[in-house]
Image (cartoon, rainbow, N blue to C red):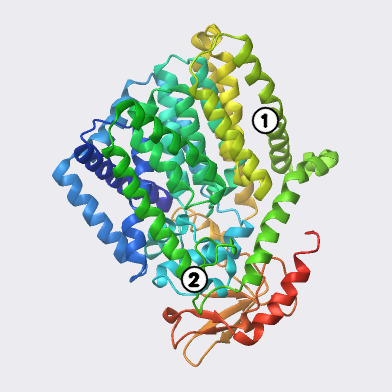
Amino acid sequence: MIAIITGWVIISFVLLSFGDMAVRLYNKLCKQKEEYNIPEIIMLGMCFILIPLSLISFWFPLNKYILIAIMSVCIFYTLKQKRIISYYEDIKAAFSRFTLTQKLITTGAVLSVFFYVLWQVPIFDSSFYHHQNIRWNEEYPVIPGLGNLEDRFSFNSNYFLLSSVFSFRFLFGEPVYALQSTIFVCILFWTLKETFISNYRTMNVILLCFFIIFFFVNKIYFTNSSTDIIPNLCSFYIISKITLHPDCLKKNFLFITVLPFCLITFKLSVFPLVLLSLLTSIVYIKQKNIYYPVLFTSVFLFCVIGLWCVRNIIVSGYLIYPMHEIDIFSVDWKVPEAISKIERWIVHGYGDIAFYEPFRELKYYEYFFIDQKYRLFGYLFNIAGVFLVCISPVFIIYSLFWRKKGCIVPYILYLICLSGILYWYISAPDYRFSNGFIWGTIFITVIIMLNKKEEINFWNKYGSITFMIATTLIFLLSIKNTFNLYHSTTPDKLNTIYIYPYSSGTLSNVEVYKINDDSAFYLTDEIEGSNNEFPVIVRSGLPDLFYRNKIQNYKTVEMRGTSFKDGFRTKAKYINQLNQKADSIVLTKFE
């Protein structure tokens, strides 16, 4: 509990500080007067802080000393400018203006999220490589050829960069993955405030419902490390903001252009959203004939994406992994092309299975209803999402041609979202990768259809009591979730829940493997529970036993020098064997 609260406070303070610095610098240099709400300042801070963290990571590990240095900068900035204090005063003032019922709704909603994130649910990707990737960032500067040890390290999501400096491992002995829940709570508070101020305007009520659905569909990923939550959450936020307030394209140029580009350094699946940034920049130049804001954002994005690409090259040898077609660097630590081919095959193959799984498995709904209610809930929402996206063009075409045309912006945004869904379906159609586009498309459709309708009086009259009942039910669900996990947890873990979240545990079956006289790894057959041990490698992999979750065997890798800092490379004698295996594997069907 203490760890989550500490994480929320420190992360929000740091990101608010850096976000405010970015906005002030932009307004001053470009002679603009753009203003943003707190969630947007935090998201801009998340983008802006990537530049110093990326630069630091080339020479230093992202550990407690970097966090202390960053905190010192933020405290100095706060004392000098006193603007950060005003943000917290704004939150306090907004909360004080709520009615008693609205205060109870807001408190219940935040506590519900809080109780959910107390229990770190084991997730495959988190346990398999997220935890270890974050730990490598904490212990060492960026390491050449780290992707040879585990090719998924080559994905190099900037989420790992932020999670390393915000792990708080030095305070609690275990990592705390509070970044995504911090951003969600800020957005949730903003959405509730907008709903209350609007007197439960139908569009705001719908937006709040969509955010609640988003949380429940992805709730287990809020408790652990996840490279999907922040891109999807921020994508949906920016889509909903523009849909409800199209004029923000002119008023919030920095936010609209910077965020989509920065999000692709977290997850490539949001790449089509950069079309929004490009279109906004073109229109901005044509209408205002002002180039300074575009120049500022271009330089800013060049730094963020350029540094991310440099880290990609150092970790994997590729500009973007696993796009082996873009092979322009000849370095001895490059991950073998065979491994990148297999990884592409796995990403698309697994995504294909994940896409059709709800449709195949739903015939066993009776079993899921008895024993796997959350899984059934996820399946139903995924199927509903696909169905609503498929029928949405009918409503959009009807609205475009048979109703009075309104603002054209939502229609353009709708096309961008559809392009995002198409890109997702072609590349890796796992629902986790595109929740932002899927629910953003549905939200745009609903708002376009309601745009000419009169307000529903029900929400104006009964909004408070309806949301009070809904919040109570959600809060009780979070308590039930805590109660169930409480009874399935060992007493020694329960004793620590008041300090830090219940973690996925420790590895029980490990073997020490010495790669040279001075350096060693832990070998394991397990994938869960690698929070504490470091460094950990799974035993299997090519050219021996192929295990789709571990592609390359640790025996094929050697150190480039005498220490981990010197990096890793694949032994030359195994390259041909790996190529032969890859050619035969990628021709088979992924199962």
- Could you tell me which residue is drawn at 36 percent across and 52 percent down? 302
- Could you tell me which residue is drawn at 20 percent across and 41 percent down? 29
Q: Secondary structure at mark 2?
A: loop
* Residue 519, x across and y down, in percent: 49, 86
Q: Amino acid at mark 2?
A: Phe
Query: Against 247, is 524 above or below?
Result: below
Mark positioned earlier in the residue sequence (2 or 1): 2
Q: Amino acid at mark 1?
A: Val
Query: Against 329, is 177 above or below?
Result: above
Q: Identify the residue position indicated by label 2 in the image.
A: 329
**In the depicted view, which residue is nearer to us: 355 or 372?**
355
In the picture, the disc for residue 389 is 1
Of all residues, the one furthest to the bottom in this rendering is 517
**In the depicted view, which residue is nearer to us: 239 or 514?**
239
Res. 389 image quadrant:
top right
Q: Secondary structure at mark 1?
A: helix
In the picture, the disc for residue 437 is none
Tell me, yes or no, if residue 493 can be seen here. yes
In what quadrant of the picture does the C terminus appear? Answer: bottom right
- Could you tell me which residue is drawn at 63 percent across and 39 percent down? 421
Query: Against 62, is 97 above or below?
Result: above
Tell me, yes or no, if residue 167 can be seen here. no
- Could you tell me which residue is drawn at 68 percent across and 73 percent down? 525
* Residue 175, x across and y down, in percent: 46, 61
Of all residues, the one furthest to the left in this rendering is 80
**Left or right: residue 19 compared with residue 119:** left
How packed is label 2: few (under 14 Cα within 10 Å), some, or many (20 or more)? Answer: few
